[in-house]
């Protein structure tokens, strides 16, 4: 086991390499030709133009001002300078709150580190247990600082219990304050925001089929009857998945055509040639430009046909609609209430922001959703616990013998010494590495299959699963040492009071491993994040080969986004490690603090200068973040119970069990207190905004504003001028019913069918807006 | 272990004793002087008058018509004759749906019994495993019919797995259908009901304090702003708990006074004398009538003072109010939405029916609710697992030696042989028995402490706890044989895959015990229920000693009510036994079927003729019933997994785990599909009823109807004429604000304070009703 000196050397080395990364970053970002890689957000906002447009030729590419290199770390204070309110304005609430996760890490762990070093380290260090044991086997300086150094049945364990209470209360206090702040930030953000279509709109799913009326008419009638004072308009959802696919194909072909045309324009002597078969490797040789032109023409025709079909065919109209209301109050009421007797029809929920809508999932019917969730739950269980099986078989196949067996003709090549060593060295690890790289994508596909309707909820679900996977395979996998499958087997065979002990005993032993993990994965990962090597290379490649116009250059930028589904679960791992080791091995805490500090600065810089968030969910992810930190707390408490039991300080267990109960109670308390702010929209707020808006703009006509807010992007981007309006025929106020039979839904149809005038004035008041 | 013959004899004996009970019941119920004991519901409904009022003297008391005795079982078909719709009308939906629990038992178990006997019994019986073992130790005829008779690793276990699937699917199918029926019955009931105040009313709790306004004004302003179109009126809740206590005391004294006056009127020679001390056992001797008259006078004065105080003192007004709306739609919207930014203030929920309100809990503030729930959760845990400790110590105390030690002066009495044997025979068991008798009361007190606001929710919570207690202490306690504490210890020390095995192995061994349990507790209990011995005796005692007028006689009737909190958990035990033993020991099933059949008839009779339900919750308990049957299914599956593992049919485990997953999935499906019908009130329904009502009664003025619907019963019963109206000063439409400072809640106060006219017409439309 590593001594304190070893760890110190490793830490110095890792800090140094992070420093090198920062210097490389500082040099690269000052070069004007990298400007679009390191400051894309400002370009996208239109606040920065290419530095290449003015100055001497060399200066266009290389920064020759040597003074700027001297201040190579000044991006750090710059990143910290922007106040939070401006940050919300600049990058959105999601990003600003995401940064608070790192900040919360600092808030929790800085005081804990100080207290732990002031109290626990002396208490642990002034024992001689480990010195009495064989020196060269288990003892190290790190262990001397840890709980391992305290003899069995010592009264000193009370210090650890008191500290566990103190750490839990401090963490809960920080979490409570933070939840309160984020909730009020969210409400403030929603309240102070300018008018947005999603404030007025509700997504209605599972509209029951009606033989006599179209979906749009059914929706209109239903809401005119049940929300007579507030209903404004609706936009039905159509299944344009095929159309979107065709449009995507055409874009791809267009891209190739551009490429070939560029090639031809550079070398006029030779028309570019391509093969039509698989990946351009086989098949007939044709003129590439002509071929693509023909393909595009064909696709355009297909697209036109498909568009007509989507517009006309009632089967393409899905039983879902975006229903807009005259006021935020009306939308808030509709989103929070149950509409119909049958709780699986007329399902209403807040409409996601238009850019947050995940269109391909809107047409999924409710019935299949339940089945999809079951399938994915089972699939995720197998993914977590059995993923090692296919990988092991791939590894077996990828070994020398496996390859020789499957493809004997490769034998002469494989037997070459260099190739052999490459295969032996890389291939087995490669399968696992590839799997881990693709895991977030797999989880994202699973979330999509489950049918969530907004990108933000997709990312949240994928993040939850990634967190669970990490918890089982990284944390428990490292502690219990073995694949998840072996663990599962071990845990099933152990009794309920042995499991905490197994974990608790292993925790202090794995401290040095996790310290190294934090340095290699955490520190280096963050330093790598700021360099943005991949976007840098891709941008320059694209810039060199493809870019012709300024617009092309803009498209070559790849700012990326926060990636909540991968980033947040990784941070949670550090919370878990910090809390678990706080009372056990305080020596680990400074590494955690450095991680959170570095990460905060780096991500603040990235958010200000680089990332371009696709959507805005107004920090809807916070309850997840909060819940996972509580889970980390609970795990740390259970591990401490196990550890102390094994140290024969068993009379302390009831105190720690009380702590577990209190922590769970704290969670339920916070859930009741703050979670509604992330799920519902209080009527008081809605009413206030409505009233203010009406007072300011008494003659506002919302209908044109909301009419086409939720149109499938394929129609929007395809041709803005030829606007795709389903709703034109519904312009008139009174929608005549086409219903012929009344057998299926007698009562509501009677009300809607009889039309308003026969009812007393309260039921259907005048709608001044609708008349306009 | 009992043979089939033994069981048969026991069954015959128990059936016979049930039969004797029925005969006794048939004889007793035909006697006119018992009429009020066996048909109180009809008296309460005013549909039956005392048979004593006409006819010959003897006939008043004894039925001499011998023909009627011949048809002594004809109450059974009579009980079954009333159609369900009439039953709903006669006894309420709660009672009608409660009966469906027994019916569901028949629906599930009759087909299962037939299939189990047709398939499983032959499969089990045609083995010789038990014959090969020592005959006199474990084998019995019952066991020959059970799964114990199948050899290890036999392929015949596949039959049991297939049957487990069949039983699960059948149970789920019945549950699904039943959930659907009950949900639609509930919605139909709510829809077809005549106008009730709770349809228009919402209970608002945690009204935030306002230094400048009274609670009533704050509520009025808030709802006029946030529900301008629908708000009608409000009634604040006042803390009349002390007043109610005083009134109760006075009533009690009055009762004693009546008693003494009656005594005096019968024996004019002697003024009744009583002692003022503890329980009338010690203290000064006084004239009883004079003493009570003085006491009542004193109390009356106190009551008058307290009433004044409650009316005047702002501290007696709680931050809670019943808010009524102009339409059901408005109430439905308000009950389902979040009102304010702070999710712990302005909490809205459906108001319970006026008779369902549990008044003493309304004043509890929200903050203390969370703490109360935590305390009760911990208390219930200890009650379930550690209740045996105080009882054991009481038992130790109640033993001969214990008594002699505590009270040596009793030694001569205790040493008497008769007393000694009584103490030894009865006292130890008495402590446990007394605890079990008082358990439902204890659980009810716990539920009250938790702060539920309606009687129905109190009963539901107490039922859940009683169910858990039964599950742990009766079912698991009988299976694992040992106190709950020992079990807890055993289960904690066992591994996750040993626990099902422990249960599974014990299940077939305990079959005969549970058969006896079903006969003694189930059959005899139900037969005893119909005799109503306790009410019978008490009624006749009261009738003899106290009754002077017809009104007294009415008060002497004690029809009781269904007692959901004790009845339902007991039925659930039979569901659990039936499902657990269905695939293991089918011989137990006929006993379950007989139980459900008998219970159905008896309870139908009781509901029609006896019970008088205090409140109507419109079958709000059904989700609990459904959930517990699913839990029983899951337990049966886990037990089967354990049993088959111990039978070394381990390759079958994955199939049964799949069944467990499917069952859990079915539960979530049902929850999403049907539970909303029991929690929320669909807007469509509300709108339909509103529209119909307005069309029928266009000039209806709801305000007087709702004005005093939710007044504390103490004010209502005390003096109806002197009506307690807080609201008189709020009659005017425009409530002038008394607010002086605007620092605390600037925005809403600005809107409400500025009053309507300055706002555009959409914000505050005219309120035609309010003007009236």
Image (cartoon, coloured by chain):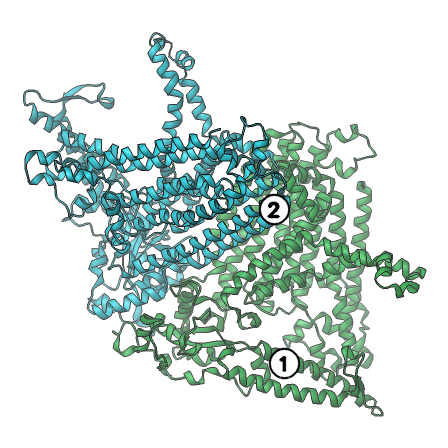
Chain colours: A green, B cyan
Q: Is residue A729 visible in the rendered structure shown here?
A: yes
Q: Which mark is residue A246?
A: 1
- Dot 2: within a 10 Å radius of its alpha carbon, few (fewer than 14), some, or many (20 or more) residues? some
Percent from the top left, x then y, of residue B116?
A: 48, 46
* The C terminus of chain A: image quadrant: bottom left
Q: Using the image as rendered, state which of residue A132 and residue A78 is in the foreground.
A: A132
Chain bearing mark 2: B
Chain bearing mark 1: A
Q: Using the image as rendered, state which of residue A368 and residue A193 is in the foreground.
A: A368
Relative side of A298 to A12, left or right: left
Q: Secondary structure at mark 1?
A: helix
Percent from the top left, x then y, of residue A362?
A: 53, 70
Percent from the top left, x then y, of residue B193?
A: 26, 59
* The N terminus of chain A: image quadrant: top right
Q: Is residue B228 visible in the rendered structure shown here?
A: no
- Dot 1: within a 10 Å radius of its alpha carbon, few (fewer than 14), some, or many (20 or more) residues? some
The verdict on a common chain for dots 1 and 2 is no
Label 1 vs label 2: CA separation?
48 Å
Count of picture labels: 2
Where A228 sits versus A373, above or below? below
Q: Secondary structure at mark 2?
A: helix
Residue shown at 65%/48% (left/top)?
A576
Relative side of A391 to B675, left or right: right
User: Could you say which quadrant of the image residue B415 lies in?
Assistant: top left
Look at mark 2 in the image and give the residue it sits on: B653
Where A13 sits versus A88, above or below? above
User: Could you say which quadrant of the image residue B405 lies in?
Assistant: top left
Percent from the top left, x then y, of residue A321?
A: 47, 73
């Amino acid at each position: 086991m590593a001594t304190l000196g070893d760890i110190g050397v490793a830490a110095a080395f890792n800090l140094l390499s992070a420093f090198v990364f920062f210097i490389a970053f500082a040099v690269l970002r000052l070069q004007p030709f990298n400007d679009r890689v390191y400051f894309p957000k400002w370009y996208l906002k239109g606040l920065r133009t290419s530095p290449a447009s003015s100055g001497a030729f060399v200066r266009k590419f290389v920064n020759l001002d040597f003074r700027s290199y001297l201040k190579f770390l000044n991006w750090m204070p710059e990143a910290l300078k922007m106040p939070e309110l401006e940050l919300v304005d600049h990058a959105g609430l999601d990003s600003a709150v995401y940064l608070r996760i790192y900040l919360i890490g600092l808030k929790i762990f800085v005081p804990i580190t100080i207290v732990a070093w002031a109290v626990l380290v002396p208490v642990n260090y002034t024992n001689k247990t480990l010195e009495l044991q064989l020196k060269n086997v288990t003892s190290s300086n790190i262990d001397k600082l840890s709980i391992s150094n305290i003899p069995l049945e010592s009264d000193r364990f009370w210090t650890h219990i008191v500290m566990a209470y103190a750490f839990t209360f401090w963490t809960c206090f920080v979490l409570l304050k933070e939840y309160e702040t984020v909730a009020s930030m969210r409400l403030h953000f929603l309240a102070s925001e300018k008018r947005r279509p999603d404030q007025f709109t509700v997504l209605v799913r599972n509209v029951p089929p009606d033989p006599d009326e179209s979906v749009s008419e059914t929706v209109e009638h239903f809401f005119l009857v049940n929300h007579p004072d507030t209903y404004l308009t609706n936009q039905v959802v159509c299944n344009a998945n095929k159309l979107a696919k065709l449009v995507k194909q055409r874009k791809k072909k267009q891209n190739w055509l551009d490429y070939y045309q560029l090639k031809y324009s550079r070398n006029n002597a030779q028309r570019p040639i391509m093969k039509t078969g698989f990946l351009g490797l086989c098949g007939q040789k044709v003129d590439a430009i002509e071929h693509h032109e023909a393909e595009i023409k064909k696709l355009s025709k297909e697209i036109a046909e498909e568009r007509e079909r989507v517009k006309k065919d009632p089967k393409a109209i899905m039983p879902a609609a975006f229903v807009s209301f005259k006021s935020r109050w009306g939308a808030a009421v509709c989103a929070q209430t149950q509409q119909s007797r049958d709780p699986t029809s007329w399902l209403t929920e807040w409409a996601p922001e238009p850019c947050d809508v995940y269109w391909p999932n809107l047409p999924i019917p409710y019935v299949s959703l339940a089945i999809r969730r079951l399938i994915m739950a089972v699939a995720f269980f197998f993914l977590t616990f059995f993923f090692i099986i296919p990988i092991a078989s791939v590894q077996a196949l990828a070994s020398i013998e496996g390859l020789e067996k499957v493809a004997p003709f490769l034998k002469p090549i494989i037997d070459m010494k260099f190739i052999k060593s490459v295969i032996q060295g890389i291939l087995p690890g490669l399968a696992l590495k590839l799997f881990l790289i693709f895991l977030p994508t797999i989880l994202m596909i699973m979330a999509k299959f489950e049918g969530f309707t907004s990108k933000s909820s997709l990312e949240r679900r994928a993040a939850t699963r990634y967190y669970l996977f990490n918890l089982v395979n990284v944390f428990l996998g490292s502690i219990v040492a073995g694949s998840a499958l072996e663990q599962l087997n071990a845990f099933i065979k152990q009794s309920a009071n042995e499991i905490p002990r197994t974990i608790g005993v292993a925790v202090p032993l794995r401290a040095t491993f996790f310290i190294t993990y934090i340095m290699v994965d955490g520190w280096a990962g963050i330093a790598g994040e700021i360099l943005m090597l991949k976007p840098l290379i891709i941008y320059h490649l694209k810039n060199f080969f493809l870019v012709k116009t300024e617009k092309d250059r803009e498209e070559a930028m790849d700012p990326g986004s926060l990636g909540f589904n991968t980033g947040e679960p990784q941070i949670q791992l550090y919370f878990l490690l910090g809390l678990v080791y706080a009372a056990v091995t305080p020596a680990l805490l400074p590494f955690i603090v450095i991680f959170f500090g570095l990460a905060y600065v780096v991500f603040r810089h990235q958010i200000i200068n680089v990332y371009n968030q696709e959507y805005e969910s107004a920090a809807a992810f916070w309850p997840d973040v909060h819940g996972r930190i509580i889970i980390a707390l609970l795990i740390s408490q259970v591990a401490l119970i196990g550890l102390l039991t094994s140290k024969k300080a068993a009379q302390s267990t009831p105190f720690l069990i009380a702590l577990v109960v209190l922590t769970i109670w704290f969670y339920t308390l916070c859930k009741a207190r703050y979670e509604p702010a992330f799920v519902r929209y209080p009527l008081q707020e809605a009413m206030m905004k409505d009233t203010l808006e009406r007072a300011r703009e008494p003659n506002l006509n919302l209908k044109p504003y909301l009419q086409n807010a939720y149109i499938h992007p394929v129609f929007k981007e395809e041709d803005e001028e030829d606007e795709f309006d389903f709703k034109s025929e519904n312009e008139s106020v009174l929608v005549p019913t086409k219903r012929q039979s009344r057998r299926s839904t007698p009562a509501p149809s009677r009300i809607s069918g009889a039309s308003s005038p026969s009812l007393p004035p309260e039921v259907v008041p005048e709608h001044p807006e609708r008349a306009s």
